[in-house]
């Protein structure tokens, strides 16, 4: 792992600590176990997802509301599918 990759991983782990337990239990295992397997574009998409507001993320992941951004919605489902495994 390069220095850049180590810094990126540390930054992502920090960004995954949300303040809502429901989101933490989704994001932390995902970034630790699945992030490295994503394509470059999906890694960028995951990072963009982390910039969204917690109430929106909560609504999307709990199924209360669908994300209108098709790409972000795809990433939500990638994470949810990973959790079901």
Image (spheres, rainbow, N blue to C red):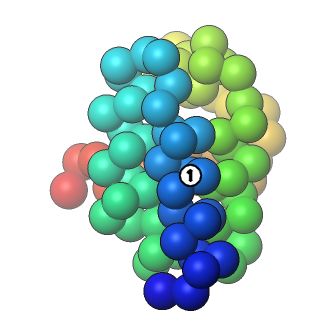
Residue 67 higher or lower than 79, as above or below: above
Residue 39's spot in the image, x, y percent? 60, 79
Residue appearing at x 44%, y 16% in the figure: 20
Q: Relative to residue 52, is residue 3 drawn left or right?
A: left
Residue 37 higher or lower than 52, as above or below: below
Residue 32 higher or lower than 26, as above or below: below
Residue 84's spot in the image, x, y percent? 24, 48
Q: Relative to residue 29, is residue 60 drawn left or right?
A: right
Which of 19 and 72 lies nearest the eye of the viewer? 19
Other residues around mark 1 within 10 Å, as few (<14) / some (14–19) / many (≥20): some
Total labels: the figure holds 1
Dot 1: what SS? helix
Residue appearing at x 31%, y 33% in the figure: 25
Residue situated furthest front in the rendering: 3
Q: Relative to residue 48, is residue 4 drawn left or right?
A: left
Which of 48 and 74 lies nearest the eye of the viewer? 48
| Residue bearing the label numbered 1 | 12
Which quadrant would the C terminus be assigned to in this image? bottom left
> Residue 27 is drawn in which quadrant?
top left
> Residue 42 is drawn in which quadrant?
bottom right
Residue situated furthest bottom in the rendering: 2
Residue appearing at x 47%, y 66% in the figure: 35
Which of 24 and 9 lies nearest the eye of the viewer? 9
Residue 11's spot in the image, x, y percent? 60, 52
């Amino acid at each position: 792992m390069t220095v850049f990759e180590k810094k990126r991983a540390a930054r992502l782990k920090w960004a995954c600590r949300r303040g809502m337990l429901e989101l933490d239990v989704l994001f932390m295992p995902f970034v630790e176990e699945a992030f490295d397997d994503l394509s470059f574009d999906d890694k960028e998409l995951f990072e963009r997802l982390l910039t969204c507001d917690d109430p929106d993320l909560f609504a999307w992941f709990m199924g209360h509301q669908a994300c209108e951004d098709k790409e972000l919605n795809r990433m939500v489902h990638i994470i949810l599918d990973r959790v079901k495994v």
